[in-house]
Amino acid sequence: MPQERPPAARGSYAKGVARRQEILDRAIEVFARRGSDKTSLRAIAEAVGVTHAGLKHYFGSLEELLVAVYRESERHEGPEDTKNPEATPVELMRDWTEANHEVPGLVQLYSTLVATALEEGHPAAREFATERFARSRRELAERVRHNQESGRIRADVDPEAVAALVIAASDGLQTQWLLDAEAPQDAALELLERLLTPRQG
């Protein structure tokens, strides 16, 4: 029969988990305002209010911290329509776009992680981006199938292709907005919606 962990050890572990979560919550606030901006782990530690050694203890590297921050931010509740099975992918994109305008730093952090994933020697970023794209395509394709059954999306388009196109449009429009706030995001989304909507009559 395995021995139970001593109470003191359990208490120490729980405190460590709580401390890591506290750091993550504070880091999300920092990144939401200013993004990653190629900031060093030491500078982030100072902004979050912990020592450089303390931050390195919990996350190991800047890349691991950036991935953890974005994954934790995704866990926070998103727009209500995300839970609405009748919402189309374009309707979700509208909600995401509106929400992202409130946290430009996290949008920039996401873009930085995806760009980093394309470089050699960044396994944490590559795993994050690869898994996220695969999951997003899978979930959006399922939503497209549901929308096709209810007549909200054309029946003659491939769900997987639509999912990939929506992700490409979402990421591309976000990048354009980061570079130029006047980029026509709304008009682009309206056009995409028209292309996917069944013709009447």
Image: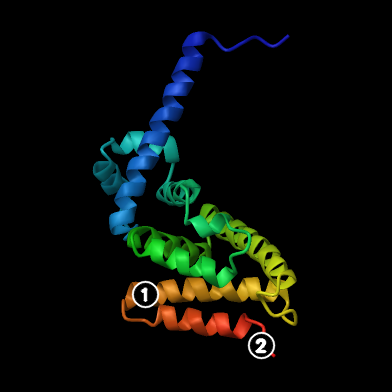
What's the distance in space between the residues labelled 1 and 2, CA to CA? 30 Å
Left or right: 20, with 89 as reference point: left
What is the three-letter code of the residue carrying label 2? Arg
In the depicted structure, whether residue 5 falls above or below residue 65: above
Residue at image point 37% right, 41% down: 25
Q: Which mark is residue 199?
A: 2
Q: Mark 1 = which residue?
A: 177
* Quadrant including the C terminus: bottom right
What is the three-letter code of the residue carrying label 1? Trp
Image position, residue 13 (x, y; %): 48, 22
Residue 19, image quadrant = top left
- Graded by Cα atoms within 10 Å as few (under 14), some (14 to 19) or many (20 or more), the crowding at tag 1 reads some
| Residue 201 in sight from this viewpoint | yes
| Residue 167 in sight from this viewpoint | no
Of pointers 1 and 2, the one earlier in the residue sequence: 1
Q: Which mark is residue 201?
A: none
Say which of 116 and 16 sits in front.
16
Left or right: 55, with 150 as reference point: left
